[in-house]
Image (spheres, grey):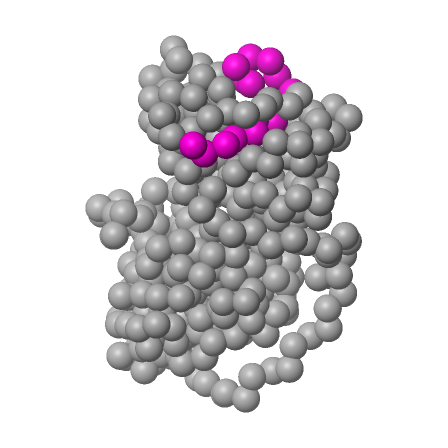
């Protein structure tokens, strides 16, 4: 049985989450906590396999609780937020930065037409994230990351017209670190696919825009790509680019189960820019992006994979490395 600790300050939400998770025969809810302080205590007492964590709570909020749990008793954590508003997503992203794995919108009540779908997504996320091996964080580890010096520049010098990046589980803090190392006047556009739960793409882009030097925005169909701008794939749309340097959004079927798809992005960039593109695969589950990176590499583009030691999940970059598709393998602090 998969042991789950539910953390939420709302009695109604706790009851709903317990009802949803307990409906799966492989899941056992071992405890429920009504604030972050109880979450830390119960995490140490019950040693759950995974924790669902609310954000806004009395006594100790979800961000502080996540940070403390990852120091005291590292446990996979799924942030379950009641809102995708920018302010709430910013708190959720900070929680990912200190160790939470992913985030989900809190399911609406049983009367909602999307209830069954939302419940299935929550169960699937909990079961999948419970398999991730998390590492103990040092106290103030988030502060240490902020004062790391710049990495030694890589020796390669390429004529590049665009950079394409893909990430999934563990991606938001990894992307934050990479983009934080780029100047505001970065000389080419950056196109980005991040697998993220429904409703969070806008808030994710806004959070990055407020916290990294380059401008970050949700990509809009047919807009002209500009240097120094990061274009984030919108919800449920593939992100691509035309030979004339314009964004091309598509609602064509998912590729290997994903829309937006990293493979779609890389293949589009390879057609548009040929060898003058850098493709980067960061931490994440599965193999999305590998086939696209192969196409990009065959056109002469340069490919980079995040290394295993700094990946939260060495799935996507691991496949790239195993299949010989990475020209360069780097720790996250050297990719920028």
Tell me residue 18's x, y (percent): 49, 20
Using the image as rendered, state which of residue 105 and residue 38 is in the foreground.
Answer: 38
The residues colored magenta run: 1-15
Q: Is 27 situated left or right of 147 in this image?
A: left
Q: Is 73 situated left or right of 271 in this image?
A: right
Q: Is residue 70 visible?
A: yes
Tell me which corner region of the image, top left, top right, bottom left or bottom right, holds residue 276.
bottom left
> Relative to 178, does residue 111 appear above or below in the rendering?
above
Tell me residue 320's x, y (percent): 36, 69
> Relative to 176, does residue 277 appear above or below in the rendering?
below
Q: Is residue 162 visible?
A: no
Q: Quadrant of the C terminus?
A: bottom right
Tell me residue 41's x, y (percent): 71, 31
Image point (75%, 61%), residue name: 144
Image point (65%, 77%), residue name: 151
Q: Is residue 8 magenta?
A: yes
Q: Is residue 186 magenta?
A: no
> Can you name the residue that lies furthest to the left here?
253
Tell me which corner region of the image, top left, top right, bottom left or bottom right, holds residue 174.
bottom right
Using the image as rendered, state which of residue 59 and residue 243 is in the foreground.
Answer: 59
Q: Quadrant of the N terminus?
A: top left
Using the image as rendered, state which of residue 302 and residue 10 is in the foreground.
Answer: 10
Tell me residue 200's x, y (percent): 49, 39
Image point (61%, 70%), residue name: 333
Image point (34%, 75%), residue name: 325
> Across the whole image, how many numbered discs are drawn on residues?
0
Q: Is 186 situated left or right of 40 in this image?
A: left
């Amino acid at each position: 049985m998969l042991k789950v600790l539910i953390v939420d300050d709302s009695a109604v939400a706790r009851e709903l989450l317990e009802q949803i998770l307990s409906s799966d025969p492989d899941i056992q809810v071992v405890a429920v906590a009504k604030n972050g302080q109880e979450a830390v205590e119960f995490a140490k007492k019950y040693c759950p396999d995974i924790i669902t964590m609310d954000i806004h709570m009395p006594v100790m909020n979800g961000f502080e609780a996540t940070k403390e749990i990852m120091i005291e008793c590292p446990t996979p954590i799924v942030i379950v937020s009641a809102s995708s508003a920018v302010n709430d997503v910013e708190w959720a992203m900070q929680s990912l930065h200190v160790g939470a794995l992913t985030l989900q919108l809190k399911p609406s009540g049983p009367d909602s037409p999307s209830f069954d779908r939302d419940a299935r997504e929550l169960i699937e996320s909990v079961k999948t994230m419970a398999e991730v091996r998390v590492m103990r964080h040092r106290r103030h580890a988030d502060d240490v990351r902020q004062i790391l010096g710049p990495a030694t520049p890589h020796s390669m010098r390429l004529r590049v017209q665009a950079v394409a990046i893909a990430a999934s589980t563990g991606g938001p803090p990894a992307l934050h670190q990479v983009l934080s190392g780029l100047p505001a006047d970065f000389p080419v556009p950056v196109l980005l696919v991040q697998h993220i739960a429904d409703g969070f793409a806008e808030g994710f882009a806004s959070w990055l825009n407020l916290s990294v030097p380059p401008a970050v925005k949700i990509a809009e169909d047919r807009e002209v790509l500009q240097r120094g701008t990061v274009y984030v794939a919108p919800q449920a749309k593939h992100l691509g680019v035309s030979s004339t340097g314009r964004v091309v959004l598509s609602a064509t079927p998912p590729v290997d189960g994903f829309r937006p798809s990293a493979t779609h992005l890389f293949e589009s960039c390879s057609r548009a820019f040929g060898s003058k593109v850098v493709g980067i695969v960061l931490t994440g589950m599965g193999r999305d992006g590998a086939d696209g990176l192969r196409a990009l590499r065959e056109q002469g583009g340069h490919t980079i994979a995040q290394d295993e030691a700094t990946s939260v999940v060495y799935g996507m970059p691991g496949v790239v490395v195993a299949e010989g598709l990475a020209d360069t393998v780097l720790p996250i602090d050297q990719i920028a």
